[in-house]
């Protein structure tokens, strides 16, 4: 029976133990554990990960295993050396600072990389004990970037999802990593790769295109014969859990105790795990300057600073802890009074009841990370505001800022902006607070963590269906035989063949486009059969086609159907087409040639083409996206169409397409066998024009109207070779 297996560095339970009390199992309160609870606790589903504990005896090991089995979990055994090198080393001393834009904290060590590979293999080995081909695997986070491809190597057809819970850096940052290609290739073993935000998704696709040399079209990556879908899925919280907790009697009782201790002071709340990406020192300095600029809030407002311990063995985190301690001490020493403490500082984690009480009493939630994949604290703060009062100040560098746009958004590097945001929050009318929070609460209720799980899993099923459809359409031996049988039985045949990318591999230099001897001989054999009417249907201009193929007994359609030439006759224009727009568009293309070395313009009678085959990998992709956006804006009121091909951007008249020309040929030359082969989306018009029983073939594994797919130009030539024998 098919099952779902979740894999993450840590299990949703923490194991603690000592000689006196024995083992203790503490369930995680995290949003991920909550959201995935409905998945791993069902049926035969399981969650695989590390417990965070090193068993001290065989007896403890068995006790842990027995408990985890009952809870649908399976442990991965990590040694102290693994934790030091793989987790504290590669994951948190290389990947974490790189992904959060702190390259100055990276320590490049080969031993870290070697351990990272070995531990990913450990996870894979544990997974193999329970896996089957029909299962669904959902891998989580940056500690396991290599795992998807390791699984794929053993189970080529299995369904694999991956979600990255931290930011994905820009190409310029990610390229700093010596192991960048291996990491990308590991990730591309997944079928669906998810990020919190569109920006993270865009950064990843840019790195895939420029570093892994994969074809990227919109949100799809062509990874060999597989299509990988990349998308953004903002993670929510269990809204009802926090709303219910905020209303519980225990929380209200705790709130009374807190308010009594604070002696009625107004509260700004800051909750973070200890990490340099959270911007805690910057936040403290901003609070100090706020008190300096607005002294009227002395003895009125207090900052409750809760810092949750994290990675205490890592030197950078020890230094950060010392810095925070010193800042808190300095600010309190400077401003404290007998009856007032400016900062109430707690270095610990708190249970949900106390957290909810803090959320309730806080007038301002101050969440100002320098970088954050999502940040759920700000969402918990809003969900806990049952009376809809309170103001959220949120860093625009947090992924959640994309959803919570009704918060006061700030740049965490702008201290003055933080100061003024605190003042704005403390003086904001209650009506405005309610209005902002109502909007955010509705969004959080709808896009909760359960919605996140559902949408991700649905998209994983969707991409697997797309992959399956492509497999079904693949022109295998039986399909080839069916085509050959119909071909032999037919009396009149109409054969449409695209040129670039179909009969001839895409070129980098213009001379590479010339037809080779093998191709010319094959076309000559195909055209020599009196029952065959061969039509080259191309986006190319008529001059090169005439020069290369004009001596053959074939027909030609060029410029996507503007010019037609029946075999043995002169060129004719399909329809009158206006070309005055070229004078206005050409300078735009020329400006991109000027700043993109290696690019050039091809001028056709009724279209213009910007080529970037010879441009540096990555730069051409970037410029083509800019140019496409520019041209589409210009084309809106001019009845022009912008086409994105393989290493080209073309602009032409909207009413011209290959399908119109193909229909004219089909009507003029009746046939009982139709074959059309093409490679890009301009050929989709040709496929759409074919009769229902035609053999239409797409070169490549993209979705298509075509009846069949083949992988490459070599497959097309092999098929034609069988036809002409």
Image (tube, rainbow, N blue to C red):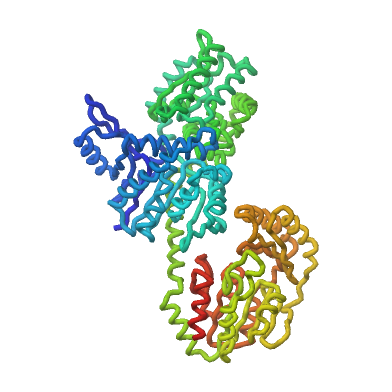
Q: Is residue 379 visible?
A: no
724 sits to left or right of 12: right
415 sits to left or right of 219: right
Q: Residue furthest left?
A: 59
Q: Nearer the viewer, residue 591 or 453?
A: 591
Q: Is residue 57 visible?
A: yes
Q: Quadrant of residue 677?
A: bottom right
- Up the image or down, 259 lies above or below 635; here it is above
Q: How many marks?
A: 0
- Up the image or down, 627 lies above or below 528; here it is above
35 sits to left or right of 382: left
Q: Residue furthest top?
A: 338
User: x, y percentage for residue 138?
Assistant: 39, 50
User: x, y percentage for residue 622?
Assistant: 63, 53
User: x, y percentage for residue 476?
Assistant: 43, 74
User: x, y percentage for residue 26?
Assistant: 31, 33
Residue positioned 63% across, 77% down in the render? 537
397 sits to left or right of 108: right
């Amino acid at each position: 029976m098919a099952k779902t297996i979740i894999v993450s560095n840590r299990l949703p339970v923490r194991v603690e133990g000592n000689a006196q009390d024995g083992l203790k199992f503490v369930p995680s309160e995290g949003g991920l554990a909550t959201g995935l609870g409905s998945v791993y606790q069902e049926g035969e589903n399981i969650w695989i990960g590390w417990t965070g504990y090193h068993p001290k005896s065989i007896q403890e090991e068995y006790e842990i295993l027995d408990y985890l089995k009952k809870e649908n979990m399976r442990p991965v055994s990590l040694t102290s050396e693994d934790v030091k090198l793989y987790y504290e080393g590669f994951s948190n001393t290389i990947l974490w600072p790189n992904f959060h834009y702190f390259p100055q904290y990276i320590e490049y060590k080969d031993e870290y990389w070697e351990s990272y590979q070995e531990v990913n293999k450990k996870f894979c080995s544990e997974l193999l004990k329970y896996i089957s081909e029909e299962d669904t695997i959902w891998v989580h986070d940056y500690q396991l970037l290599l795992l998807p491809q390791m699984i794929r190597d053993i189970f080529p057809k299995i369904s694999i999802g991956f979600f990255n819970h931290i930011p994905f850096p820009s190409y310029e940052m990610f390229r700093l990593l010596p192991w960048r290609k291996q990491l990308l290739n590991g990730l591309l073993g997944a079928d669906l790769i998810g990020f919190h935000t569109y920006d993270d998704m865009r950064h990843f696709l840019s790195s895939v295109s420029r570093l892994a040399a994969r074809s990227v079209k919109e949100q799809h990556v062509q990874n060999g014969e597989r299509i990988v879908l990349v998308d953004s899925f903002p993670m929510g919280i269990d809204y009802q859990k926090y709303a219910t907790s905020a209303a519980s009697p225990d929380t209200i009782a705790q709130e009374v105790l807190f308010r009594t201790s604070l002696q009625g002071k107004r509260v700004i709340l800051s909750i973070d795990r200890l990490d340099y990406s959270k911007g805690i020192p910057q936040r403290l300095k901003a609070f100090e300057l706020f008190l300096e600029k607005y002294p009227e809030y002395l003895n009125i407002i207090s900052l409750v600073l809760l810092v949750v311990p994290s990675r205490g063995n890592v030197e950078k985190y020890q230094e950060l802890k010392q810095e925070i301690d010193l800042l808190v001490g300095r600010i309190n020493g400077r401003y404290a009074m007998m009856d007032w403490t400016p900062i109430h500082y707690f270095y610990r984690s708190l249970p949900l009841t106390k957290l909810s009480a803090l959320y309730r009493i806080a007038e301002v939630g101050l969440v100002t990370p320098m970088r954050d994949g999502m940040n759920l604290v700000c969402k918990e703060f809003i969900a806990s505001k049952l009376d809809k009062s309170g103001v959220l100040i949120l860093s625009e560098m947090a992924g959640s800022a994309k959803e919570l746009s009704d918060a006061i958004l700030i740049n965490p590097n702008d201290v003055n902006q933080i100061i003024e945001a605190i003042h704005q929050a403390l003086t904001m009318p209650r009506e405005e607070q309610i209005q902002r929070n109502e909007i955010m609460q509705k969004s959080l209720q709808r896009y909760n963590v359960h919605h996140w799980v559902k949408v991700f899993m649905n998209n994983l099923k969707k991409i697997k269906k797309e992959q399956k459809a492509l497999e079904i359409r693949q022109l295998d031996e039986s399909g080839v035989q069916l085509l050959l049988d119909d071909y032999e039985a037919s009396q009149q045949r109409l054969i449409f063949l695209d040129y670039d990318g179909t009969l001839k591999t895409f070129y980098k230099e213009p001379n590479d486009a010339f037809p080779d001897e093998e191709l010319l001989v094959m076309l000559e054999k195909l055209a020599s059969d009196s029952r065959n009417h061969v039509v080259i249907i191309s986006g190319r201009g008529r001059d090169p086609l005439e020069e290369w193929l004009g001596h053959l007994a074939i027909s030609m359609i060029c410029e996507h159907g503007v010019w037609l030439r029946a075999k043995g006759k002169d060129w004719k224009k399909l329809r009158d087409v206006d070309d005055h727009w070229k004078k206005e568009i050409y300078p735009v293309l020329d400006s991109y040639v000027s700043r993109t070395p290696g690019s050039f313009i091809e001028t056709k009678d009724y279209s213009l083409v910007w080529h970037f085959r010879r441009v540096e990998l990555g730069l051409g992709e970037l410029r083509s996206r800019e140019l496409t956006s520019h041209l589409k804006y210009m084309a809106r009121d001019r009845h022009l169409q912008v086409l994105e091909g393989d290493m080209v951007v073309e602009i032409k008249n909207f009413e011209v397409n290959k399908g119109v020309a193909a229909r004219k040929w089909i009507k003029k030359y009746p046939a009982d066998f139709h074959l059309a082969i093409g490679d890009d989306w301009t050929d989709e018009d040709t496929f759409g024009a074919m009769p229902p029983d035609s053999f239409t073939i797409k070169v490549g594994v993209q979705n298509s109207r075509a009846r069949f797919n083949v992988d490459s130009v070599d497959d097309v030539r092999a098929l034609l070779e069988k036809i002409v024998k």
